[in-house]
Image (cartoon, rainbow, N blue to C red):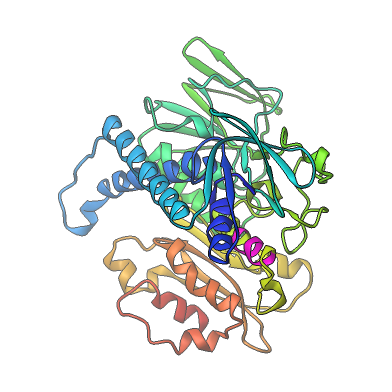
Amino acid sequence: MIIGGGPAGNTAATYAARLGAQVTMVERDVIGGAAHLWDCIPSKTMIATGGAMSFSRRIHGMGLEQQEAEVDIEALTSRIEGIKARLQQGTTRLLESQGVELLHGTAQLLNDHDVQVTTAEGTRVVAADAVLIATGSRPRIPTWCTTDGERILTTRECYPPRIFPESITVIGSGVTGVEFVHMFSSFGAKVTLVVSRQQVLPQKDPEVAAVLEDDFLQRGVHLLKGARATSIEREGDAVVVRCDDGRVVHSSHAVLAIGSIPNSDGLGLDAAGVEVDSSGFVTINRHCQSNVSHIYAAGDVSGKLPLSSVAAMQGRKVAEHVMGLQKVAHRHLDYDKAASAIFTEPEIADVGLAEADAFAVGRKIRVTKVPFSATPKALINNDFRGFVKIISDPATGVVLGGSIVGRHAAELISVIALAVTANLKVTDIVESLLVHPALAEALAEAAE
């Protein structure tokens, strides 16, 4: 029994069914996952459109006459809905082709094996040998704020867009927050970002954050550093954000991007004896097992990295473990080697050991860095912002991690991610015969 049809749930269902399991999946919202299809895909679609608008503003540097693009909200909404529908239909067809029973409704554990499923047709109890909790998460709303879905928004309420705000205040300078800053500024909004620390992306490399901050400032984004929002209120057609240091921001809209909370309530976890931590995340081991060995958790609800790629891999590992494949060749999921990306402009991506973390524990590392400005393809693209940084072991040459800031960083990081996962050496990258001209040449140069 799988509760939740997001990347973790549908991947687990597919692999378990291929391995011979009888699989039942319950999803209350949308096959493909609410966080994936209501958050990730729409936001990245809007970011791609905003990126095209930004590019149109700088095409004069490529020998073209300047053109000013205008957004068509109806066409953009149709595009977003079309992409979501296509992905949902594809996932549904794949699951059905594998013989997975799909139930649209809610599920609650009655004990550690019996799951009560409520659908439009009624209620039934399904007995399961193993249960996977993959119910995802939802945006966190603090007690000092009440969202209205009109001008004070959660990230999930920003799309499809009804209008594009003239001005907006973004609260939260983590991954989601900076993506929304990029998106709204690309569409021409006056954006203020409330940054509780002294740099955006406080968990990232300071050099990476500096490049992004510079781009924001060039766009006219107002960075309110060292400020923590304490209240958000409507005043007519305006929104007023007040901070703990006395500063006040006025804008037409505000969006909260301050994290998420797990959808672990109402599942009957207590009845099944499943333990959760103080934040409501299901506590799991390296096999994604809860304290009840045949009840698993994966995806956002597991409290690990909130990435669709991680959720999908967790789902695959759960299927393998349930079907006994851990007794043969089975590689454990190493969260420290997960690649991640931020779809701002320029894009940001990283994987593996971070430079600051290595220095914090006194580990000796070799750090090499190459700017894209030294790469012919970046000059051809008229976009040479950013750099490639590779971290390796000075004694063995094994690649330990890396960061990329620049165009197509989310794609380029795959090379470093493969090297980190497979314990490749910098010489393996250097001696690869890469395409010229290509941005990937910077990878080989950084590995030199």
Front-most of 276 and 381?
Answer: 276
Instruction: Report the side of 383 relative to 88 (left or right).
Output: left
Image: 174 above or below 326: above
Q: Is residue 432 visible?
A: yes
Residue 374 location, x and y as percent?
38, 73
Q: Specify start and end residues of the magenta stretch as a single range.
A: 315-321
Image: 396 above or below 25: below
Residue 361 location, x and y as percent?
79, 69
Write down the quadrant of residue 267 in the picture.
top right
* Count of marks, rendered view: 0
Image: 238 above or below 172: above
Residue 244 location, x and y as percent?
71, 27
Front-most of 65 and 49?
Answer: 49
Asked if residue 316 lies in the magenta stretch, the reply is: yes
Instruction: Report the side of 436 relative to 102 (left or right).
Output: left
Q: Residue at x 79, y 46 (%)?
A: 112
Asked if residue 409 lies in the magenta stretch, the reply is: no
> Principal SS element in the magenta part?
helix
